[in-house]
Image (cartoon, grey):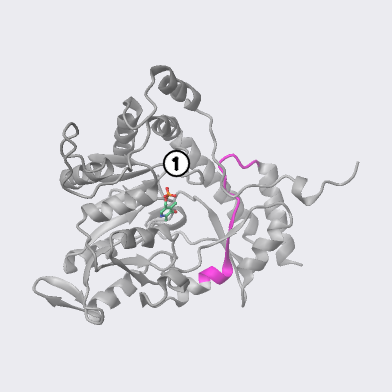
Amino acid sequence: MPAPTLSEMPVVPLSAPEFGGREWQYVKACLDGGWVSSAGPFVERFEQMAAESLGVRHAVAVVNGTAALHLALLAAGVEPDDEVIVPSLTFVASANAVRYCGAWPVFADADPATWQMDPARVEEFVAQRCRWNRGRLINARTKRRVRAILPVHLLGHPCDMDSLLRIARRRRLRVIEDAAQSLGASYRGRPVGALGDAACLSFNGNKVITAGGGGMVVTQRAAWARRARYLSTQAKDDGDEYIHRALGYNYRLSNLHAAVGCAQLEQLPPRLAAKARIAARYREAFADLPEVACPPVAPWASPTHWLFTIRARGRGNRSAKLAAFLAGQGIEARRLWRPLHRLPIYRGAEQIGGAVADALYAGTVSLPSSTSLTEDDQERVIAAVRGWVTR
Ligand SMILES: *Cc1c(COP(=O)(O)O)cnc(C)c1O
């Protein structure tokens, strides 16, 4: 038999969805009952389950995590020409949601110890580059009002929230958590997503659990939840008379997606256990390799290990080389996101440092971390990384 060509070689995926629960049963219930669209029992159930699991009072299900961020920022009162502090190192959606509001991101560098948004950089910005003007915090250079901080719990690891919340309280800033990658993580024993004024979840296909697509705004603030729900349903003031006083959006989640989401949320604890097992195995396998650093875990963090991301020691662009090497072996590995201050769309944006994010971008690669990853496949990944290191 001829050797398999590269395209025929089994690919070990980075983060594949896994459906092992009641997904079929719930989707069938939607189809049988005719409730497939934006009304239906699963939407409410999905919201209740998510709110309960985080210990927050309100949850509003929407079409995706990006829409959740957009609505949370609007509910927080972010207005055109405001500024919102966002980490340099995150997926572009975090900053784009700020622009959807007509506001501007200010990029804060990562903390080298945690890879998360660095509270020291945020403090540096608000203390040295902003001033008070009639009860408002103003960026002295741009003259824009600084309204909020948007910490992103990257790769399943929480940010140093007490430090960020302290800064926010002193400067009267709102805090919107981007918990898209970190459902199930906790910070000092408190669930991520219940720490700021509001938080956003994503149920995209590559996250810890998926609804096929979906997002959620969660908050303790009834007024914010009301506002988010109102804006998500075309800002309907009177559905019969078609009266709209605000610019709304069609962001509501469908019952079909919520049905999948409910079945997946029921599976969250075993999925988190699988992620933790995978992370522990990688750690053990690379413990003797000085060339490979495993992702940091802060003492106050209980992460979800969404993607296990290693850092190759050395100089130059190791991440692209390592990712390409692994791809050649049928292993889907991915570099972290290009720091947002490097993106053409955000050229000229305000930034507070950025060298740490740049260095992480040049040196890190996320390894296959699907909850369905078999031990054999993980051994393949480990052997490939070892092979690259000792090449
Ligand atoms: C996935 C993700 C989003 C966006 O979620 P979607 O559901 O894909 O719109 C936002 N922020 C971060 C950090 C993400 O990883």
Q: Does the stretch in magenta take in 293?
A: no
Residue lying at the far left of the rendered structure: 134
Please tell me which residue lies in front, 255 or 383: 255
Q: Position of residue 280 (x, y in %)?
A: 56, 50
Residue 37 falls left or right of residue 194: right
At label 1, counting other C-alpha atoms closer than 10 Å, the crowd grade (few under 14, some 14-19, many 20 or more) is many
Residue 341 falls left or right of residue 149: right
Q: Does the stretch in magenta take in 366?
A: yes
Q: Would the CB of label 1 be found within 8 Å of ligand 1?
A: yes
Residue lying at the far front of the rendered structure: 241
Q: Position of residue 226 (x, y in %)?
A: 19, 42
Q: State the quadrant of the N terminus.
A: top right
> Which residue in the structure is indicated by mark 1?
213
Q: Position of residue 329 (x, y in %)?
A: 74, 54
The vertical placement of 366 against 205, above or below, is below
- The part of the chain drawn in magenta is 360-374
Q: Amino acid at mark 1?
A: Gly
User: Residue at horizontal 24%, vertical 75%?
Assistant: 126
Q: State the quadrant of the C terminus.
A: bottom right
